[in-house]
Image (cartoon, grey):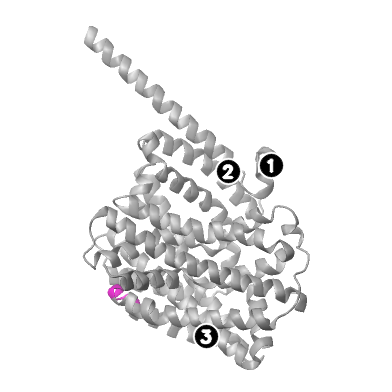
């Protein structure tokens, strides 16, 4: 495969990753982290860039992709987990979130107070999802539209904003807010969950593999190599942009109090380019959100049409766009309210599954290790998710809070290690029992 093809596939992956969360959270992190910016940003890049690239790599290593990775725990777990992930990174959460952010940044700034914003949102989302549906119907054209046209345009626009911002906004970093005063790395680590890119990697992995296979690459080692290269290209672009807009956020903290990253970037764009900056930023957000929605819609279409062969790819794409269109009209606040608890529950399971995939050769893919590790992780991930929903856990809260790393939101790490060791011990004990039974049969 030509180097230029790998570059364009890497650009396509970047454009699928780079959506609403990728623009919202880094500048807000920068504003909060202040003088602890680099420590906090490092944690953010670990889960916001490193983990998604590792997931893409892990999917390419396993024949059968993400579904096969989950099957190592149990087929029922695999299907349930993957369906939940696809629905949430697809029509029930990420897709409507991106459509809403595109509207908030691309259209809302130009509406007067007397305008019926609900009606405008309805019209905008109808056009938005109509174009998404049209492009998603032909996934073979995705690289042409996204890798060769939209992604380079998006990169140029964002880099322009970053370069001008870093030169023109000349204010010192403030002291970090309470969340970043101690444990800035771990705060950034957890903030990286919000991009949802690691979950999306489970879906995007099959899209990238298909794009590479269409160029005649079918050998497993070659597929893995080219997939990893595409992931590295996307990862470098994401890291550079996160750092850039994060630095703008850190510099803008002196210019006022902001509720989220959209407010920071809006103020920065207006400060740098005047009213034209609002238009410029609206174009950036709309392109970023659009490419992500197309990628997620295509991935959902491919997954569910394979899971349910009687349902065609076109039918799934139609259903995904219709549900996304409907939920996007509920408003951004309602969508974001659900996202944090879900991510707190699912990310630990994904991280442990990926780590086990990379170390599987050392325990020979024994299911007991996968099952035990995921069970222990899942229990405490569930407790963390219920906490995020605001539920009082009673005595379980005290248990959770006494675990190592609980103060930084990583209370599941030690249970995951205990579960892995327990699974390995059970597998070794089972082997000894089988060996003894075999000897008894031979001597009897």
As for residue 417 lying within the magenta part, the answer is: no
Which circle marks residue 412 in the picture? 2
**Residue 333 appears in the figure:** no
Image-quadrant location for residue 132: bottom left
In this picture, residue 49 sits left or right of residue 437: right
As measured in the structure, the alpha-carbon distance from the residue carrying label 2 to the one carrying label 3 is 40 Å
Magenta segment boundaries in residue numbering? 136-140
Residue picked out by circle 1? 401
**Residue 250 appears in the figure:** yes
Residue picked out by circle 3? 283
Q: Earlier in the sequence, mark 2 or mark 1?
A: 1
Say above or below: 337 vs 427.
below
Q: Position of residue 361 (x, y in %)?
A: 36, 39
Say above or below: 301 vs 280.
above
Label 2 SS: loop
Q: Position of residue 114 (x, y in %)?
A: 65, 92
Callout 2–callout 1 Cβ contact below 8 Å: no
Say above or below: 258 vs 275.
above
Which circle marks residue 254 in the picture? none
**Secondary structure mainly formed by the magenta segment:** helix
Residue at image position (48%, 45%) is 352
């Amino acid at each position: 495969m030509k180097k230029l093809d790998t570059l364009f596939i890497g650009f396509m992956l970047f454009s699928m990753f780079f959506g609403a969360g990728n623009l919202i959270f880094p500048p807000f992190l920068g504003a909060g982290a202040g003088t602890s910016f680099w420590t906090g940003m490092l944690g953010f890049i670990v889960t916001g860039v490193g983990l998604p690239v590792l997931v893409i790599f892990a999917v390419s290593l396993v024949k059968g992709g993400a579904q096969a990775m989950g099957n190592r725990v149990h087929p029922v777990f695999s299907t349930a987990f993957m369906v939940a992930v696809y629905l949430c990174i697809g029509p029930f959460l990420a897709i409507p979130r991106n459509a809403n952010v595109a509207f908030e940044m691309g259209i809302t700034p130009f509406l007067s107070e007397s305008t019926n914003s609900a009606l405008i949102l309805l019209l905008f989302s109808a056009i938005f999802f109509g174009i998404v549906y049209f492009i998603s119907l032909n996934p073979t054209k995705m690289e042409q539209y996204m890798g060769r046209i939209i992604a380079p345009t998006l990169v140029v626009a964002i880099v322009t904003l970053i370069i001008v911002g870093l030169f023109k906004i000349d204010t010192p970093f403030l002291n970090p807010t309470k969340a970043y005063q101690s444990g800035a790395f771990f705060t950034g680590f957890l903030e990286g969950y919000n991009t949802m890119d690691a979950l999306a990697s489970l879906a995007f992995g099959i899209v990238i593999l298909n794009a590479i296979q269409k160029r005649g690459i079918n050998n497993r080692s070659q597929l893995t190599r080219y997939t990893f290269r595409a992931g590295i290209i996307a990862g470098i672009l994401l890291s550079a942009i996160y750092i850039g807009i994060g630095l703008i956020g850190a510099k803008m903290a002196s210019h006022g109090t902001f509720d989220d990253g959209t407010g920071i970037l809006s103020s920065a764009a207006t400060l740098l380019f005047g009213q034209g900056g609002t238009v410029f930023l609206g174009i950036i957000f709309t392109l970023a959100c659009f490419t992500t929605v197309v990628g997620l819609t295509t991935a959902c279409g491919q997954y569910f049409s394979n899971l349910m062969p009687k349902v065609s790819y076109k039918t799934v794409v139609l259903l995904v766009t219709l549900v996304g269109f409907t939920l996007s009209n509920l408003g951004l606040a309602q969508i974001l309210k659900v996202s944090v608890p879900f991510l707190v529950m699912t990310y630990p399971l994904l991280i442990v599954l990926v780590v086990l995939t990379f170390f599987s050769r050392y325990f020979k893919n024994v299911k007991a290790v996968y099952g035990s590790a995921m069970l222990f992780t899942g229990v405490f991930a569930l407790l963390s998710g219920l906490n995020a929903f605001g539920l009082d856990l009673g005595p379980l809260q005290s248990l959770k809070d006494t675990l190592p790393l609980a103060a930084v939101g990583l209370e599941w790490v030690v249970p995951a290690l205990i579960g892995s060791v327990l699974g390995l011990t059970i597998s070794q004990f089972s082997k000894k029992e089988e060996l003894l039974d075999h000897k008894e049969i031979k001597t009897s």
